[in-house]
Image (spheres, rainbow, N blue to C red):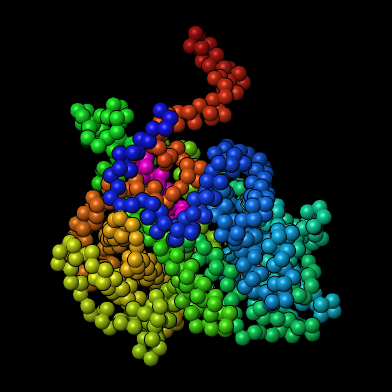
Amino acid sequence: MAGVDYLADERNKAEFDVDSMKIVWAGSRHTFEVADRISKLVANDPAFRKDDRPMLPRKELFKNTLRKAAYAWKLITELRLSEEEASKLRFFVDEPAYTDLHWGMFVPALKGQCTDEQQSKWLPLAYKMQIIGCYAQTELGHGSNVQGLETTATFDPQTDEFVIHSPTLTSSKCYHTVEVLCTWWPGGLGKVSTHAVVYARLITDGKDHGVHGFIVQLRSMEDHKPLPGITVGDIGMKFGNGAYNTMDNGVLTLDHVRIPRDQMMMRVSQVTREGKYKQSDVPRQLVYGTMVYVRQKIVADASCALSKAVCIATRYSAVRRQFGSQNGGPETQSAHYRKSYTGLIQVIDYKTQQNRLFPLLASAYAFRFVGEWLKWLYTDVTQRLAVNDFSTLPEAHACTAGLKSLTTTATADGIEECRKLCGGHGYLCTSGLPELFAVYVPACTYEGDNIVLLLQVARFLMKTVSQIGSGKQPVGTIAYMGRVEHLLKSRCSVQRAEDWLNPSQVLEAFEARAARMSVSCAQNLSKFSNPEEGFAELSADLVEAAVAHCQLIVVSKFLDKLQQDIPGKGVKQLLQAVCGIYYLSLLHKHQGEFLATSYITPKQAALASDQLRALYSKVRPNAIALVDSFNYTDHFLGSILGCYDGNVYPKLYEAAKKDPLNDTVVPDGYHEYLKPLLKQQLHSAKL
Ligand SMILES: CCCCCCCC/C=C\CCCCCCCCCCCCC/C=C/C(=O)SCCNC(=O)CCNC(=O)[C@H](O)C(C)(C)COP(=O)(O)OP(=O)(O)OC[C@H]1O[C@@H](n2cnc3c(N)ncnc32)[C@H](O)[C@@H]1OP(=O)(O)O
Ligand SMILES: Cc1cc2nc3c(=O)[nH]c(=O)nc-3n(C[C@H](O)[C@H](O)[C@H](O)COP(=O)(O)OP(=O)(O)OC[C@H]3O[C@@H](n4cnc5c(N)ncnc54)[C@H](O)[C@@H]3O)c2cc1C
């Protein structure tokens, strides 16, 4: 059967040019070519094998990751890969490792929070990986509440050093009942990092100046042993087999560890030789800058994880057949399927399957485009910060926080839905979906718990509403609040299902819903004499208003994308249909909010559902081509159910045969545990 493409008929149905769509998905022809080349390099190199991951014991798994990371670094240096190529290599190797924290957080923290002089000392070492760093912020007792961190950095003017110390019960500041309040969670900390950016409360002359970042050396550069005063290790196994267990998330206690004064990251504020605390002109929030950077990256990654799951579920839904007539199949079926599956229905043709799958397919595209836009926004804010323009920082914070929350929640839920869409076989590790879910789901928690982040968006929204009428015109993603009077009064003008394809109508519907929910929250808040109390009491409503605002951003960026020139036969038309599925499925899911805010009528909601069904039919023949456009190799997908040729069943059978349990026909343990049991039954039966 080798070489047969069981999805060929599906591919032949496509009404658009897949090669052009691949470029749209990648972002540009150049990005496509880089990704295509690097993905093949990884797929064809046995050193990057990953199918054994779920079966390896932790120590072996971890050592294997160290080997892969060292080998990847060798390739990067020997092949002189550019930054873009190296990051694609990491992406296609598809294994969380300490290098993520080194490149993704340690280096950005040095860049964003160190002075030029400090950068010139630390960055060259980090770039060459002569030091390996992690981002040590979260403590056992504090993660979300960064202001509440209890590790201290006390300046000692005698020696010109900071004394970094983890609090214990003996510390007057400790309000917990555990004995040691250590740093807990940082990736790369447990076993690898030589250095860490540690966040601690800065104390000078007995005064607490709040949380600041410090560069702390953890391990000897000679023998990798922890330096005096430092206790460090791994925090133990995490959810799932393989999965995030390739990462050494760590625990760290610092017992009066001394570091030179110039290892405080001093871009935002400084401590002088005399111990004087000085604040630069830049806002204090820049201490949180690394998180803004990483949240933006996480949004871009969401479309990758979701598209991977959707690719698997879509291909398998076209392969899998259930029920249907036994008397002859549709003419479009391939010879193989005509023979073996005559008349059975491909599960992708069930409307319920489409109703669960196609909105996820659409979300993968939507998150791709909003991720591209967010990258642009982040670049823009960085350029502004460089010339001391801090005006767009609050919006950048709200957008990165909100979109990180929205996209990771939808992606984690979407991966699990894809597992269910694959029926029983989705539960097999060889489907790739259990590991994908286990690796992905902590994204809802790390870099800010998703609810905590939505509450940040809600604060931003409430602030914006409170400034309406003050003369300060809202701009950017919040500009619609400037038209709030109109949005509160307006009514949806849809009369026929097709009217829901009108972009300005759709945009107004999402703007009106978001504006009305925010204004309603603000009105309710104003009834409280203590605003903080009101905010806490109304937080569930505020989170919903924040979600409405973030969904509006995603919808508007997808619609904006469709305004661009998109070359390739049928590509734009298909993307219009995909975009329609994205916003109409949201409208359907949140119908209650659109109706409750009285912007649409029940009749108009019903017309939206009619249009959504019509779009499912439009997308159905293109579904396989739409997931082929992600251009994922079988290695990257790591899924038998999602393999390109659709030859699922023989591969499942072969993989099962290779399971270690099948190494012997009679299992280990038979003689100790089964035989005596069976003998005993035989004996008692005889009695
Ligand atoms: C094996 C093979 C390997 C191959 C190797 C190949 C080699 C590698 C080559 C290349 C590789 C490249 C790889 C790159 C990979 C990159 C991927 C990155 C992976 C990431 C993995 C992530 C791991 C996880 C890390 C973490 O989790 S770190 C810890 C994160 N912690 C949090 O997020 C805590 C959440 N809490 C907070 O953010 C805050 O405390 C808060 C909730 C925002 C509240 O802050 P607080 O000050 O208390 O609050 P407020 O009073 O509400 O706010 C005051 C004020 O500030 C504003 N604000 C708040 N935050 C920000 C901000 N971030 N920016 C700007 N402004 C902010 C807020 O709005 C308020 O403003 P106003 O006063 O104006 O209202
Ligand atoms: C896999 C993984 C990797 C990580 N890597 C790192 C790392 O490299 N470096 C690092 O420093 N940290 C890291 N972390 C830690 C991570 O950043 C924190 O776990 C995260 O910020 C959430 O904080 P928390 O654990 O304190 O959750 P908590 O805040 O304790 O959340 C518990 C619950 O309380 C709710 N909650 C909390 N505050 C509020 C509020 N104000 N209002 C309403 N509800 C609230 C939350 O929604 C949640 O439901 C990692 C975590 C994980 C899981």
In screen coordinates, is 553 left or right of 98? left
Question: Magenta residues, as a range?
Answer: 301-318
Percent x, y of residue 2: 43, 30
Residue 14 position, x and y percent, is 30, 47
| Residue name at image x 30 percent, y 52 percent | 16
Q: With respect to residue 194, does 494 lie above or below?
A: below
Determine if residue 513 is in view: no
Q: Quadrant of residue 411?
A: bottom left
Q: Identify the residue at horizontal 38%, vertical 52% (top origin).
A: 19
Quarter of the picture containing the N terminus is top left
Image location (x, y in percent) of residue 244: 57, 49
Residues 280 and 148: in front is: 280
Residue 502 falls within the magenta-colored stretch: no
**Relative to 582, is 37 above or below?**
above
Residue at 45% over, 64% down:
371
Splitting the image into four quadrants, where does ligand 2 fall?
A: bottom right
Residue at left offset 81%, top offset 77%: 160
Residue found at the far bottom of this picture: 471
**Is 618 above or below relative to 393?**
above
Q: Is residue 608 left or right of residue 356?
A: left
